[in-house]
Image (spheres, rainbow, N blue to C red):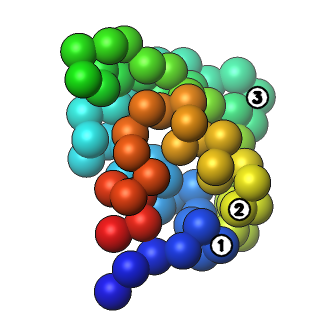
Amino acid sequence: MSREKSNWTFRDVKRFLESKGFALHHVRGSHHYFRGFVLGQLRMTHVQFHGSGSIHPKTLGSIIKQSGIPEEAWLE
């Protein structure tokens, strides 16, 4: 079953990033910064903690761009 951009929670994003080799680098307020290597390049992305609520699709689009992980991998 494929996912859409509209049904991701903070926990889903965190789990996905960690499965792709990202690790929590630091936390500043409600923003969690993850760092990892994608295609040999160091990438950093930040994810705002929304509790159990879903992340806005445009915000998730920004997280996808920052991570460098192809969008197709996110939406599988």
Q: Is residue 74 visible?
A: yes
Disc 1 crowd rating (10 Å Cα; few below 14, some 14-19, many 20+) is few
Q: CA distance from mark 1 to mark 3?
A: 24 Å
Q: At 46% across and 61% down in the image, what residue appears?
A: 12
Q: Which mark is residue 6?
A: 1
Element carrying mark 2: helix
Q: At 70% across and 62% down in the image, what residue appears?
A: 57
Element carrying mark 1: helix
Q: At 59% across and 67% down in the image, what residue appears?
A: 5
Q: Position of residue 46 (x, y in %)?
A: 61, 31
Q: Amino acid at mark 1?
A: Ser
Q: Which mark is residue 57?
A: 2
Disc 3 crowd rating (10 Å Cα; few below 14, some 14-19, many 20+) is few
**Label whose residue precedes the other's in the sequence (1 or 2):** 1
Q: Is residue 32 visible?
A: no
**Label whose residue precedes the other's in the sequence (1 or 3):** 1
Q: Which mark is residue 29?
A: 3
